[in-house]
Image (cartoon, rainbow, N blue to C red):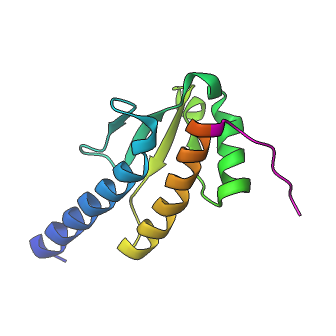
Amino acid sequence: MGPEWVTKQVKDLVKNRDIILEALSPLGEGAVKGGEGAIYLWAKLPEQDVDDDKVVLWLAMRHGVVVIPGGACGCPGHLRISFGGLTENDCKAAAERLRRGMEDLVNNGILEWRSE
């Protein structure tokens, strides 16, 4: 491992960051912060859905995507989304589920789900 490896890792992280940023776009301009020098982003939840623990559970159960509640990191009302450690294809698959979840959240709020 040398400089070439580091350069490739950074390029892959930037690609993944951009993929996740696009998936979070339904939250609106200014809702997402971070990604510079870190492998995660912060996403501010819509005002009607500020219980980040409930949103995290809802995203996992209804949309099959796992993120961290911001409150667990001292930032309630936000989500912490990591984009490190993923292949580009895995990141794209997760981003698609995340995007559907964000669109659903913004348009409908948290709807009930059934665990089967």
Q: Residue at x 86, y 58 (%)?
A: 115
Q: Considering the image in quadrants, where does the C terminus appear?
A: bottom right
Up-down: is 1 above or below 66?
A: below
Which quarter of the picture shows residue 110?
A: top right
Q: Residue 72: horizontal and vertical position, in percent?
A: 59, 34
Up-down: is 75 above or below 80?
A: above
Q: Considering the image in quadrants, where does the N terminus appear?
A: bottom left
Q: Which residues are magenta?
A: 108-116
96 left or right of 107?
A: left
Which quarter of the picture shows residue 102?
A: top right
Residue 114 on the magenta span: yes
Q: Residue at x 40, y 34 (%)?
A: 28
92 left or right of 78?
A: left
Q: In terms of depth relative to the viewer, which is nearer, 101 or 42?
A: 101
Q: Residue at x 54, y 28 (%)?
A: 46
Q: Residue at x 65, y 57 (%)?
A: 63
32 left or right of 4?
A: right
Q: Residue furthest right?
A: 116
Q: Residue 88: horizontal and vertical position, in percent?
A: 36, 72
Q: Taken as a whole, is the magenta stretch helix, strand or loop?
A: loop
Q: Residue furthest front?
A: 107
Q: Give the number of callouts.
A: 0
Q: In terms of depth relative to the viewer, which is nearer, 13 or 96?
A: 96
Q: Residue 67: horizontal and vertical position, in percent?
A: 56, 49
Up-down: is 38 above or below 47?
A: below
46 left or right of 22?
A: right
Residue 60 on the magenta span: no
